[in-house]
Image (spheres, helix red, strand yellow):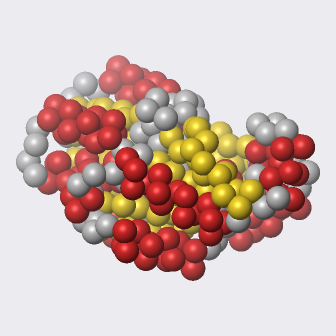
Amino acid sequence: MYKIIVDSCGELTEEMKKDGHFVNVPLTLEIDGEHIIDDETFDQAYFIDKVAKSPNAPKSACPSPNAFMEEMECDADNIYVVTLSAELSGSYNSACLGRDLFEEEDESKNIHIFNSKSASIGETLIALKIAECENAGMSFEEVIAAVDKYIAEQHTFFVLETLETFRKSGRLSGLKAVLADTLNIKPVMGSTDDGYIQQLSKGRGMNNAIDKMTKCVMDVTTNCEEKILAISHCNCPERALSLKKKMESMAKFKDILVVNMRGVSTMYASDGGVILVV
């Protein structure tokens, strides 16, 4: 028996929700004093509208160690936790503390915490890789080794429609944000090997930026037929479908998943943003 716990930045597909091995532990979002739990009740349209109307930046809080511990109380012998990049959130440290506290009372289970070094559907793909390894009959140690290798080879890319959240949070100067919006410049961003965020390219307009992102993807992706590619979008299903078709025209992948973002990803990607992971 195994269980895979994913913080709510990692979107679960409908199939994963029905599977029984996967569960989300929610982060909490905050905007103008209102606290919003990032679970199945999350209303994306309401949140996008509230953020757009506010002069303040939205914030997120990671799950408590106790929230992870509660999910570890189960029948599974092998428990795996997948969190947001430790460089972007306290979720990883919280999960590690939850495991340590749990093991003080119960040492009968095998528990491992994976730092995704990614976010959103990067976490989703890692969770699916864990399940694939478990279903193949691998031992707990073999699963960890295989998934660590998978994480090291994974690449995350994203393009944002607006930089407003970054401007409001002080991560980008107001002048740069205004210039980017005025000139319709869309940065193409990606993850570093350590789980930080870096700018890879930029384009004039979303279509041009997405074209440049797909080139960045193909520059680092080999053996596509053996890999699952995943796309998450913030309230732009047509854009995500167009990106899916573009990637299908460039290479044959094992599968391509498309999901709508949950709360944490929505907070950072903002309306119209897309994330691609392979």
Residue 278 as seen in the image, left or right of residue 145: right
Task: List the single residue furthest toward the left.
Answer: 137
Q: Residue at x 42, y 39 (%)?
A: 116
Task: List the single residue furthest toward the top.
Answer: 104
Residue 229 as seen in the image, left or right of residue 49: left
Q: Residue at x 68, y 43 (%)?
A: 60
Residue 51, horizontal then vertical, whole percent: 81, 58
In the rendered image of this protein, does residue 242 appear above or below residue 146?
below
Q: Residue at x 61, y 42 (%)?
A: 199
In the rendered image of this protein, does residue 133 appear above or below residue 112?
below
Residue 184, horizontal then vertical, whole percent: 78, 61
Quarter occupied by residue 260: bottom right
Residue 84 visible somewhere in the drawing: no
From the viewer's side, name the closer residue of 181 and 132: 181
Image quadrant in which the C terminus is located: bottom left
From the viewer's side, name the closer residue of 140 and 33: 140
Task: List the single residue furthest toward the bottom.
Answer: 238
Residue 182 as seen in the image, left or right of residue 66: right
Residue 43 as seen in the image, left or right of residue 196: right
Residue 274, horizontal then vertical, whole percent: 57, 62
Residue 123, horizontal then vertical, whole percent: 42, 48
In the rendered image of this protein, does residue 35 appear above or below residue 234?
above
Residue 138 visible somewhere in the drawing: yes
Q: Residue at x 16, y 31 (%)?
A: 141
From the viewer's side, name the closer residue of 110 and 250: 250
- Please count the marks in the image: 0
From the viewer's side, name the closer residue of 26 and 9: 9
Quarter occupied by residue 90: top right
